Image (cartoon, helix red, strand yellow):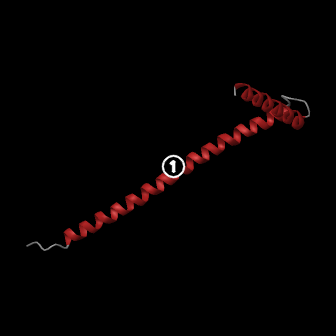
C-alpha cells in the first residue's frame, strides 16, 4: 500500500511538472508565472475579504430585523399600558 501511495505521489509530481513546463514553455519561475501567482494571491485575498464582508452584512441584517421586531413588541406593550383603565 505504501509503495502505491509513493507511486501516485511521484506520478502526480511528474504531471505537475509536465503541465508547468507546458504552460510556461520550460521557463519555470518566469516573470509570467510570478505575475500569475501574485494575481492569484491578490484575488484569493480579495475573495476572502469579500466573503468576510458579506458574512458581516448578513449578520447585521439579521440583527437589525430582530431589533426592529423587538422594538415593535415594545411599542405595542407601551400602547397597552397607556390604554389601560386607571381603576
Q: Position of residue 6 (x, y in %)?
A: 74, 26
What residue is drawn where x is 48% and y is 52%?
59
Label 1 Cα crowd, 10 Å radius (few <14 / some 14-19 / many 20+)? few
What residue is drawn where x is 33% and y is 62%?
71
Quadrant (top left/top right/bottom left/bottom right) for the N terminus: top right
Q: Position of residue 69 (x, y in %)?
A: 37, 63
Quadrant (top left/top right/bottom left/bottom right) for the C terminus: bottom left
Relative height, residue 16 to residue 50 (above, below)? above
Asked where in the image residue 2 lies, by quadrant, the reply is top right
Relative height, residue 80 to residue 31 (above, below)? below
Front-most of 7 and 83? 7
Front-most of 62 and 16? 16
Left or right: 6 with respect to 18? left
Left or right: 28 with respect to 71? right
Q: Position of residue 61 (x, y in %)?
A: 47, 57
What residue is drawn where x is 79% and y is 27%?
10
Residue occupied by mark 1: 56
Relative height, residue 16 to residue 69 (above, below)? above
Element at label 1? helix
Left or right: 7 with respect to 23? left
Q: Position of residue 49 (x, y in %)?
A: 60, 43
Amino acid at each position: 500500500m505504501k509503495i502505491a501511495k509513493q507511486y501516485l505521489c511521484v506520478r502526480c509530481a511528474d504531471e505537475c511538472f509536465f503541465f508547468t513546463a507546458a504552460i510556461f514553455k520550460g521557463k519555470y519561475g518566469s516573470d509570467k508565472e510570478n505575475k500569475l501567482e501574485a494575481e492569484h494571491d491578490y484575488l484569493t485575498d480579495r475573495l476572502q475579504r469579500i466573503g468576510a464582508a458579506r458574512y458581516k452584512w448578513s449578520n447585521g441584517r439579521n440583527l437589525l430585523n430582530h431589533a426592529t421586531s423587538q422594538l415593535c413588541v415594545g411599542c405595542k406593550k407601551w400602547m397597552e399600558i397607556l390604554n389601560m383603565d386607571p381603576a
